[in-house]
Amino acid sequence: MPEGTLCNKNPIQTAQALKALLADTGGKKYYEEMQALDVDRSLLWNTVKKTFKSRMHTWLKICAHCGLCADSCLFYRIHNRDPKQVPAYKIQATLGEIIRRQGNVDNKFMWMAMETAWAKCTCCNRCGLYCPHGIDIGVMFSYLRGLLYQQGFVPWELKIGSGMHRIYRAQMDVTDEELVETVKWMAEECQEDYPGLSIPIDKIGADIIYTLNAREVKHYPEAIAEAAILFHLAGADWTIPRSGWELTNLAMFAGDWEASKMQVEHVYAAMERLRPKRMVGTECGHAHRATVVEGPYWAGRKDGSPPVESLHYVEWVAEALKTGKLKIDPSKRIKERVTLQDSCNYIRNHGLKEITREIISYLVAPGYFVDMAPNREHNYCCGGGGGLNGIGIFRNQRNKALITKRDQIIETGATLVLAPCHNCWDAIRDLEEQYHIGIRWSFLKSLVIDLVEIPEHLKPKR
């Protein structure tokens, strides 16, 4: 069958094509067209031959089918230990079959592979932590997603998200002009309570360039104001770039390798143009992974690092508290049971497991913090990572995936969950709406503002 008008192998390249896809509410026509979408077997196998390198080839070969990855997977655990939910089985039944069949697969197979890649794996990489051979199944699933994307078998929302990055260099239809307008609005909103506060835009040579999540611009502008307040109270020399401000990368979730590279290069161009000492990214796990951990390799940077030193927001907050640039009022420290969601993307993938607990020691009164079990790099995914949060066709699978995190939180007895990651924050919000376990959830910024001491010279004159 000829490719559909909405579901096809072509990436979104124009605003008109993006608008047409958005108009297809829930992806109804998109998925109808996908039912008859042909697999270009020649393209698939040629892509594999060019890109399936020795590392992943070795991983597929050396997997001993030992099953040690099974209990590491939240999907295996919540599906009554179904053998078909074992990570090794899932990758062998999808990517492994594509290799064994030399790309000779059909539409039905690609539908199965799409559901497996996005609804049975969040690429949290927990299974790789326990594999005795060091096989990184998360990386292999990311590769599989790329093959599926190229063939047009990608969830509707992620085709849109990837298209947003191609058109707007942001995960949502937010222009640079809208970013500037929102920033100015937030600065004005803060002036009465924080006189002298400003949000510099495109300042060259600042100590910090601050990058955002487009959702903050479009839906949560208060998050921008909160960041500005804390930078102001800490006396930071900072700026937001007019262009290259979007840290997130839904193209990575979609498997759109080209757009992933385009997005990080756009952020790197802002770093090189403004020449800050450091970049601090907002509270988003996958954005940090995409831009700081994976991005340098996509962009071909030989040192494996972004153009300037790049920190996740938790690193900046910990530093500001440790150096006394931000001080917590002891009388305001939290006195309710608190737990912490460890984000896979900056803890398991970047080792930032203790720094969040340093922050907790400042914010929470002794005896009120209770760690989840397990925790740190052993913690489970929130259940909505890897793009699963936003995929309507797989919403039932996502809601079930929240069960492990629900049970972990219940076991702590906590009423407040600290979640310094947009995806984790969303999943825990949805978890409460779905299961009603009686919790609150919060990013770092708003909590710190509630607890921080305001220096006398920065208080408003009433």
Image (cartoon, rainbow, N blue to C red):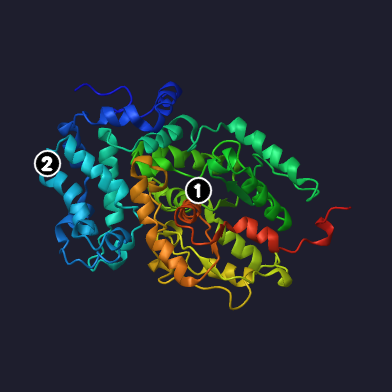
Describe residue 414's horizontal placement relative to residue 286 as left or right: right
Q: Tell me what residue is drawn at x 88 percent, y 53 percent.
A: 461
Amino acid type, callout 2: Gln
Number of dots carrying numbers: 2
Dot 1: within a 10 Å radius of its alpha carbon, few (fewer than 14), some, or many (20 or more) residues?
A: many
Q: Residue furthest front?
A: 436
Foreground: disc 2 or disc 1: 2
- Residue 134 quadrant: bottom left
Amino acid type, callout 1: Pro
Can residue 177 be seen here?
yes
Q: Tell me what residue is drawn at x 71 percent, y 66 percent.
A: 327
Q: Tell me what residue is drawn at x 27 percent, y 60 percent.
A: 76
Gap in angstroms between the C-alphas marked 2 and 1: 39 Å
Position of 50 relative to 70 (above/below): above
Query: Which residue in the protein does label 2 denote?
Result: 102
For mark 2, give the secondary structure: loop
Dot 2: within a 10 Å radius of its alpha carbon, few (fewer than 14), some, or many (20 or more) residues?
A: some
Q: Closer to the camera, 447 or 288?
A: 447
Q: Position of residue 130 (x, y in %)?
A: 28, 68
Query: Which residue in the protein does label 1 denote?
Result: 307
